[in-house]
Amino acid sequence: MQYAPRAHKACRMTSNALQSVPISGPPVSRWFGFFSEFRRDSLGFLLCCHAYGDIVKLPMGRIAGLLLREPDPAMYLLNHPADVRHVLVANQDNYTKAPVPPVESCIFGQGVLHAEGAAHHHQRRLFLPFFHGDHVNSYAGLIVEKAAALADSWQKGRTIDIGQEMTQLTLSIIWRLLFGQDIGPEAVEITQAITTGQHLIKKQYDSLSARILPLWIPTADHREFSHGHRRMNAMIRQFIQDRRANQQHRHDLLSLLLAATDGEGQPLGDDYIRNELVTFLLAGHETTASALTWTWLLLSQSPMVRARLADELATVVGDRLPTAADIPRLRYTKMMWDETLRLYPPAWLLHTRVSRLEDRLPSGVRLPPGARLFLSPWSLHRDPRWFPDPNRFDPDRFSEDAAMHRPAFCYIPFGGGARRCLGESFAEMEGLLIVATVASRVGLRRMDTQPILPNPLMTLRPSKAIQMLVEPVASPENYPTAG
């Protein structure tokens, strides 16, 4: 699939070297800075910034300067893997996460996604066992069971909204892992609340006026968000209270949290537990659902890739259901999954980092204290220096030999360093097992030929519903080998 950014006045080339002062950047509005261009086409704007070197200055404009009481506020986009590694790993203690918009803070609170310092380290240590090692492998049966049941429920010849189907599938899986029971009719309400929250978060990131407008002012967006947020909160708090009252232990995240203690050895409060449950509920299904949706779209457009995938599944899995033990042998499936995450990383933009002290990046640029840094997997993953012909879907980029010749941190779908995604191992296993299960049972073919562009909300969603025709699964030799 090709992604062609819209034309930008910011795309004029510059010959300034990376170490020159001032650092180069696109021309932007004097008053509104880069926000106007970024809001109009965030993904295209980031790609156009490749023309300005490995570190790009993005002025925030005079209005931001007045609000922040700074003479020339700016953000800096890092386009070189060495600089990204320096910020996320080598000198990570010098960088903290910038304050997030009010809606994002309201949703996640001080859960592991937003906590800093000692609190963040304590939270990661608490959750690591749940999302790694034997714990992760023990979830394989649930994942395959849910995926097989869903695929078998699709009637051949029926058209389905594959994004909606993948969202319901991954939501049903994470709900069982969090609460130890199947999700009911509340699934529709939850997904609608998440979508509403995502749109409002993006709006607050893109617009300073939206960011500073109090949530209690009853705009249409605020009312819709508040309704969904209250309902989700009430649902989760009821789960917490019921489990406390029953003193019933299950092998789920809620029981883990109820049995855990904070840094001072005290039981965790309801607010703390609520924050963590919401964090894993949203991060644990939305990102994987997005990646799976893009996977089926890319496969429907790539007969050669479909044929190689079918051949591997026939060899490794055959007529049975896949298991966790199959994953090391699903090498091409893994390459295809990694290439999907390269083209459409669900976390297309990492949280802004702010420097505590002056720092010198490997590129030679000196950053002042308080510098705000943009780190974008989308931008890194589509840089032709690391991925030639970057818009082309080519799983062979992730062969062992090809990966050895690329620099570290040019591919960061799960971030890096101390804040690397806790659920990476789980997400990878879930994605591979769902692909293997569904692709072994049905064929999926997109009927519409209109291009689908990515919509950069909090995760990278398709811009419109992707309708796919359910067909009988074809044997490898029946796939076309060209086209």
Image (cartoon, helix red, strand yellow):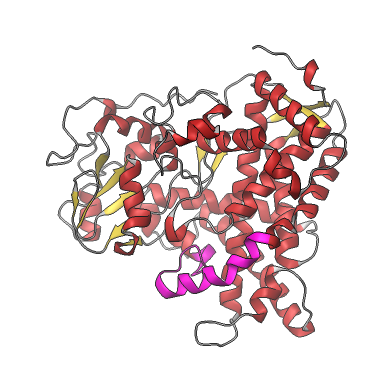
Tell me where residue 294 appears, x and y as whole percent: 61, 34
Residue at the farthest left position: 21
In the image, 60: left or right of 110? left
Q: Nearer the viewer, residue 122 or 138?
A: 138
Residue plotted at (80% across, 58% down): 184
* Screen quadrant of the N terminus: top right
The reply to whether residue 40 is in sight is yes
- Total marks shown come to 0
Tell me where residue 122 appears, x and y as whole percent: 50, 74
Query: Residue 42 appears in which quarter of the rendering?
Result: top left
Query: Residue 197 appears in which quarter of the rendering?
Result: bottom right
The reply to whether residue 462 is in sight is no
In the image, 175: left or right of 59? right
Q: Nearer the viewer, residue 108 or 333?
A: 333
Q: Is residue 186 above or below residue 394?
A: below
126 in the magenta segment = yes
Residue plotted at (76% across, 84% down): 245
| Helix, strand or loop: magenta stretch | helix
Tell me where residue 123 appears, x and y as whole percent: 52, 71
Residue plotted at (39% across, 59% down): 213
Q: Is residue 72 above or below residue 403?
A: below
In the image, 314: left or right of 77? right
Q: Is residue 70 above or below residue 19?
A: below
Residue plotted at (17% across, 40% down): 23
20 in the magenta segment = no
Q: Nearer the viewer, residue 189 or 146?
A: 146
* Screen quadrant of the C terminus: top right
What is the span of residues highlighted in magenta in the rendered image?
A: 106-133
